[in-house]
Image (cartoon, rainbow, N blue to C red):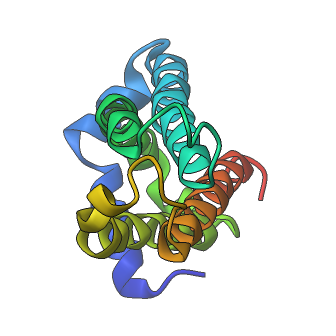
Amino acid sequence: MTAPAMNNVFSWLEDTWLAETVRSTAYLYPVLESVHIIGIALLIGPAAAFDLRLLGIGRRTLPVTTAANHLLRLSHLGFVIAAATGVAMFLPGAKLIADRGAAPWKLGLLLIAGLNILIFHRRTYPSVANWDTNEPTPVAARLAAVVSLTSWSGVTIAGRLLAYT
């Protein structure tokens, strides 16, 4: 159950023009859901391929920097699409969705995924020239890949459960 102060925020969100537009426009919500799924695919597909490269798949044929340059741009685009459509779908039923059991899981796993990205790109990736192709991927990068695969999978599962829990 959400705190009274948060209920006020959620009520305010439900009363915004965007929430009203999503609620009152025929077929807008299912279109948002469809675009959201496309965004998730663009986010998680390339990120998972990059994570698999960090775990050693294709190590001798594909440099990490090449994988990052091609895959992470798509992943960033997918994140923008998924985040924008996710917010638009959240607004019309903010109180109901926030009270769902999966909501804190989705938010928590999103935070873990975001922190993992931040730590990886600030601490591990700057030394990529030392392990780009011929050297084994450092443990920190492999750990980041496992956390990424796990957290993004969890975000997806929790997001799906929002409709049922």
Which of the 4 quarters of the picture holds residue 77? top left
Query: Residue 78, percent across and down?
Result: 39, 33
The answer to whether any part of residue 79 appears in the image is no
Tell me: 46 left or right of 131: right
Query: Residue 124, percent across and down?
Result: 34, 71
Front residue of 13/142: it is 142
Instruction: Please name the residue shown 77% across and 59% down the image.
Output: 165
User: In the orientation shown, which residue stands out farthest toward the top?
Assistant: 26
Above or below 66: residue 96: below
Instruction: Please name the residue shown 41% across and 39% down the image.
Output: 63
Which of the 4 quarters of the picture holds residue 83? top left
User: In the orientation shown, which residue stands out farthest toward the right?
Assistant: 164
Marker count (numbered): 0
Query: Residue 4, percent across and down?
Result: 42, 85
Q: Quadrant of the N terminus?
A: bottom right
Tell me: 115 left or right of 31: left
Front residue of 16/125: it is 125
Above or below 101: residue 25: above
Instruction: Please name the residue shown 60% across and 36% down the image.
Output: 58
The answer to whether any part of residue 86 appears in the image is yes
